[in-house]
Image (cartoon, helix red, strand yellow):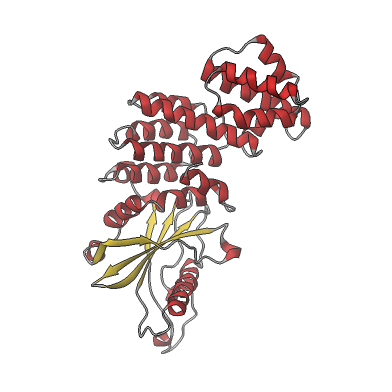
């Protein structure tokens, strides 16, 4: 499985958490985000040659269903600094987000001192919040906005602010502009993931992504699009085929279609996605059997053409565990003969 696939599979929070991390762990994408969205006066200070992913999270365990973070280490004026992005993946802003940030930044500073106990000063942490919820952002941006203050006590209250990137405030054309096209696609789809017309957005994003010359990057983010869509959307996703059809590079389109099939296969194998086939039987053994069998037939027909009546009969009469084993082996087959040989081997072992 790819690095992007791993991120979606290991995420215990939401598909939005996985999508954010899978995308922003890509150094080139994060670098483009910082260059285009951080204040220009800050960008001029950052030495991007030293930009390096700090591969851990500082979010409290109890809040990981609400927040995700990405941290990059860099240098500002020759000294260590951290660029911190907190992703708010709820539909409603967290009023206490500035306090959460202070806690997470303190976790980072605590770790820094543990690693360098002789340090005389703490490195700066430049915080930002990325938000894609439907409701307007109305959370205070400073500690002074959440603490009761009367009289001359302001100087005793810790205070700072953060950069807010509410995707709903950005026109689509603004998100899609930039020298790193994959970033535009990521932000565009995260903005529209809840929309009723998401299918059309998906097709447009695929067409935009097909303009990337670097096929490796193109395929990475086509996989990102597919995984995010399969995990975050609960519709029939018929638009995925339309999206793949607009990819101009035939080789890239073929590989992307294979990736889409593999994601489907992973989904029903793990009981997360395609287990919803034959919804009337959902949760019952009969429904699971029917779902597996229908999906496997679709994948076989798509890869190798119409299957033989004998093979179809094997699928229809098979037990659930054997169908699962066959599904796991399906992408190792080069043709239908390999599939038939697999069943023959199972018969000799007494399994089919």
**Residue 232 horizontal/vertical position (percent):** 54, 42
Residue 278 makes an appearance in the image: no
Q: Residue at x 40, y 30 (%)?
A: 203
**Residue 216 horizontal/vertical position (percent):** 35, 38
Q: Residue at x 49, y 63 (%)?
A: 57
Residue 207 makes an appearance in the image: yes
Q: Is residue 18 left or right of residue 179?
A: right
Q: Is residue 171 above or below residue 149?
A: above
Q: Residue furthest bottom?
A: 152
Q: Is residue 4 above or below residue 226?
A: below
Q: Which of 178 and 248 lies nearest the eye of the viewer? A: 248
Quarter occupied by residue 249: top left
Q: Is residue 299 above or below residue 84?
A: above
Q: Which of 326 and 292 lies nearest the eye of the viewer? A: 326
- The quadrant of the picture occupied by the C terminus is top right
**Residue 60 horizontal/vertical position (percent):** 56, 67
């Amino acid at each position: 499985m790819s690095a992007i696939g791993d991120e979606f599979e290991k995420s215990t929070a939401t598909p939005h958490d996985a999508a954010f991390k899978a995308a922003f762990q890509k150094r080139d994408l994060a670098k483009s985000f910082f260059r285009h969205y951080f204040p220009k006066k800050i960008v001029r200070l950052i030495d991007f040659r030293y930009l390096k992913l700090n591969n851990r999270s500082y979010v409290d365990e109890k809040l990981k269903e609400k927040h995700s973070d990405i941290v990059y280490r860099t240098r500002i004026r020759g000294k260590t600094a951290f660029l911190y992005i907190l992703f708010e993946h709820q539909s409603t802003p967290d009023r206490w987000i500035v306090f959460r940030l202070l806690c997470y930044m303190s976790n980072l500073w605590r770790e820094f001192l543990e690693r360098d106990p002789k340090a005389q000063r703490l490195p700066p942490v430049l915080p930002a919040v990325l938000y894609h919820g439907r409701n307007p952002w109305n959370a205070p941006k400073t500690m002074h906005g959440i603490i009761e203050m009367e009289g001359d006590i302001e100087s005793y209250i810790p205070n700072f602010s953060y950069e807010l990137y509410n995707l709903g405030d950005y026109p689509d054309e603004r998100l899609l502009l930039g020298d790193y096209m994959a970033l535009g696609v990521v932000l565009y789809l995260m903005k529209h993931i809840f929309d009723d017309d998401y299918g059309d957005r998906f097709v447009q994003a695929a067409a935009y992504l097909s303009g990337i010359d670097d096929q490796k990057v193109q395929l990475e983010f086509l996989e990102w699009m597919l995984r995010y869509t399969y995990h975050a959307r609960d519709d029939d996703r018929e638009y995925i085929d339309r999206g793949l059809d607009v990819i101009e590079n035939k080789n890239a389109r073929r590989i992307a279609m294979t990736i889409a099939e593999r994601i489907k296969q992973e989904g029903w194998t793990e009981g997360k996605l395609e287990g919803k086939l034959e919804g009337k039987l959902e949760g019952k053994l009969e429904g699971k059997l029917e779902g597996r069998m229908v999906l496997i037939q679709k994948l076989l027909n798509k890869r190798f053409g119409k299957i033989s009546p004998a093979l179809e009969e094997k699928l229809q009469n098979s037990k659930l565990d054997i169908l699962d084993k066959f599904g796991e082996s399906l992408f190792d087959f080069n043709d239908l003969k390999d599939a038939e040989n697999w069943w023959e081997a199972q018969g000799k072992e007494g399994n089919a």
